[in-house]
Amino acid sequence: MAELLQALLQRPNFVAFVILFLWGIYIMAAHPNYVKKLIGLYIVQTSVVFFLVAFSAKDGATVPIVSAEMASLGARAYANPLPHVLTVTAIVVQVATLGVSLALVSAIYRKYGSLDEDEVLKRVE
Amino acid sequence: MILELPLLVFLVMTAAGAILAKDLISAVFILGTYSFTLALVWALLGAVDVAFVEAVVGAGLATVFFLLTLSTASEKDTQIRRSAIPWTALIGLPIVAILLLYGAADLPAFGDPGSPASTHISPIYLEGSVAQTKTPNVVTAILMDYRSLDTLIETVVIFTAGIACALIYGKGSA
């Protein structure tokens, strides 16, 4: 138990990721308001990106921009660039999906006049 | 690490604010702060390109999308009423949280230069990309040279999203 607590204290990023991820999923599933559901979706997406970027950090490393006078330092002097590349793509795609889902929510609001799931379901019947 | 802990606490607090706020417009603006704090954390971790994209696309564009959606809604619809708490979720999620935290001990230590992710392929890019692509920024070199097809198809995804938005809005106004 003590070593598990110590392992968690060494990884504050992971603890923050778990809180954000699960809270976002809970809001997505449980909240009746569509916009709040999308806020939960956004928090889940960004928390996963956060988890991936936390892997790229190295102690004492700088940003992955290689200058000529630092070329002799080798890979250890720079943060891992691969998670950065993959997550840059992921962030742009996540905002694209968010835009489509917000357009759908706005279409639902124009048709049924409510952002609340229970209210919309009532008006559908 | 010393600067990072307060930022992480602030990050979770802003996320909580965005989730708990009763007014949707306030929730969206707090979500913008959350995005920007996240960008600060990433800049601190050395991921400057990701921080730029998050600050521009996440804090800027996503907030504008949310506000565009809410701008058509009347004031009574953007206020939230209290709702019942589903107990199954409140029992299930802590179990998942405990399992995830239990698995944390097997992850590589934070900032460990010898972790598998940092020793497997990324040194090849870091040491060879300047000679091969003449680009000092390794992230740009991978995004635009080694993975340019990936980036090309990503623009197709964004184009598709744009078409979907145009179709949804166009159908409503006709």
Image: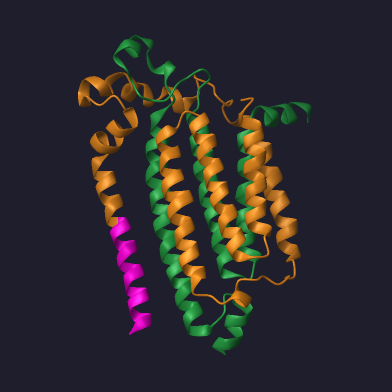
Chain colours: A green, B orange
Q: Is residue A15 visible from the viewing direction of this image?
A: no
Q: Is residue B17 left or right of residue B40?
A: right
- Residue extending farthest to the bottom is A125
Position of residue B150 measured from the top left corner of the image (x, y, whole percent): 28, 45
Position of residue B167 measured from the top left corner of the image (x, y, whole percent): 32, 74
Q: Nearer the viewer, residue B138 or B31?
A: B31
Q: Is residue B124 visible from the viewing direction of this image?
A: yes
Q: Is residue B36 left or right of residue B97?
A: left
Quadrant housing residue B50: top left
Q: Is residue A50 above or below residue B115?
A: below
Q: Is residue B126 above or below residue A94?
A: above
> Could you tell me which residue is drawn at 56 percent across and 69 percent down?
A34
User: Does residue B170 show up magenta in the picture?
Assistant: yes
Quadrant housing residue A6: top right
User: What stretch of residues is rendered in magenta?
Assistant: B157-174
- Residue extending farthest to the right is A2
Point out the image quarter for the C terminus of chain A. Answer: bottom right
Q: Is residue A19 left or right of residue A2?
A: left
- Tell me which secondary structure the magenta stretch mostly adopts: helix
User: Does residue B47 show up magenta in the picture?
Assistant: no
Position of residue A82 measured from the top left corner of the image (x, y, whole percent): 39, 33
> Could you tell me which residue is drawn at 39 percent across and 40 percent down?
A86
Q: Nearer the viewer, residue B82 or B67?
A: B67
> Could you tell me which residue is drawn at 53 percent across and 75 percent down?
B73
Q: Is residue B111 above or below residue A48?
A: above
Point out the image quarter for the N terminus of chain A. Answer: top right
> Could you tell me which residue is drawn at 74 percent across and 30 percent down?
A5
Q: Is residue A52 above or below residue B35?
A: above
| Number of on-image labels | 0
Position of residue B170 measured from the top left corner of the image (x, y, whole percent): 33, 77
